[in-house]
Amino acid sequence: MRPRTLRTALAALTAGLAAAGCLTAAGPAAAQESHQSHQRNDCSRSVSLTGFSDALDKTTYDETYVGNLSALTRDGHRSLAALSDRSELFRLDARTLRPRGVITLADEKGAALDSEGLVADGDGTYLVSSETEPSVRRYSRTGRILDRLPVPDDLRTAPAGRARANGSFEGLTLLPGGRTLVASMEYPLDGDPADLVRFQTWQRTRHGDFRLGAQYTYRTDPGLGVSEVAATPDGRLLVLERGFTSGVGNTVRLQLADRHRGGTTLGKTLLADLGDCPSLGATAKQPQPNPLLDNFEGMTVTGRSGGRLDVLVVSDDNRNDVQTTRFLRLRVRV
């Protein structure tokens, strides 16, 4: 796809996203959420926190550990899908977050994926990115591989390409109109500037498969990587930047990205540093600048409310006792 066509593709995203339900706020202060002033819940002028839930932390479903969650997507009416980076895909009730089902994904040889990105396509199939090669595959509702998308040689994990291990396709989103798919790299390629990451696109053909499209560059804040991207209804991208410092904790920032002056560079605007959100009674099991923070990796737009977007974010607990599987509900003005 030529660079000037990205804005057109982004602008076509359907604006009628239905609300995916609401989270139950957790924590002593969160129980009084409906009585708190809007200002007290503000993370910034553009973002407010309306609730959080730790309901799935250290739980199991159908003898499967519910954690390591790295991606979220709306999956039909009142449903969500959450993807573990250990190859499990959970279907969740959007209101209660209770699991409704789980399937295990694998590559063509039956090996587990380092699955990081997830899209529920309109035909009922799933598009899943893995950092292992990296790759993007299409799966049926039962977990059968249907297709595998081409990947540029440069983006392959070294030594085949210039991508670092555990630093490639971390985010995945389907752009406006369902015709353009975007995968975001987590970290720079070998030889690229320390703050520059690549966003790869694919274009859907008339036959329903995807061919390689344009590649874009995006500059992160110092020391941060891109953990997720999500399309907005007006044709831009929400970008979740994340980093971790031992003894200090996580830095998580929500950015709004768009094509910059018609080229292949994506400009960005800071919407909020999530460390500035109210904690609403959340607790942390390790040092954090704000006890609300954790290793946030998954994000999806679930609907609209009062001219703002409802955005759901989830953390990857890495099956670690000092980390938490936590969902945040944000209201975002873009």
Image (cartoon, grey):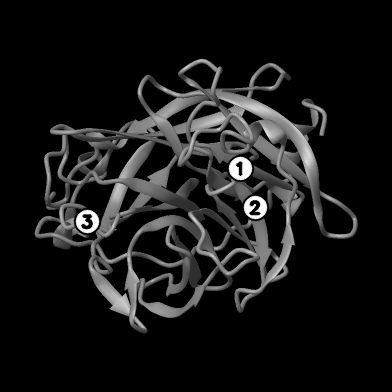
How packed is label 1: few (under 14 Cα within 10 Å), some, or many (20 or more)? many
The residue at the point 80 percent across, 32 percent down is 5
Mark 1 or 2, closer to the camera:
2
Residue occupying the point 37% across, 84% down: 62
Residue farthest toward the left in the current orientation of the protein: 28
Q: Report helix, strand or loop for mark 2.
A: strand
Look at the numbered disc 3 and give the secondary structure of its residue.
loop
Residue 130 visible from this viewpoint: yes
Please give the residue where the numbered disc 2 appears in the rendered image: 136
Dot label at residue 230 = none
16 or 74: nearer the eye?
A: 74
Indicate which disc residue 183 carries: 1
**Residue 207 place in picture, x, y as percent:** 89, 59
Residue drawn where x is 59% and y is 29% of the image? 162
Q: Position of residue 29 (x, y in %)?
A: 11, 55
Question: Which residue appears farthest toward the right when viewing the image?
Answer: 206
Quick check: 319 left or right of 146?
A: left
Q: Residues within 10 Å of mark 2 (few under 14, many from 20)?
A: many
Specify whether 180 is left or right of 56: right
Element on which disc 1 rests: strand
Q: Tell me whether the residue at label 1 lies in contact with that at label 2, contact meaning CB atoms closer than 8 angstroms.
A: yes
Q: Is residue 205 rendered to the left or right of residue 6?
A: right
Q: Which circle's residue, 1 or 2, is located before the other in the chain?
A: 2
* Residue type for callout 3: Asn
Q: Which residue is mark 3?
A: 320
> To which quarter of the image does residue 244 belong?
top left
Distance in Å between CA atoms under marks 1 and 3: 27 Å
Q: CA distance from mark 1 to mark 2?
A: 9 Å
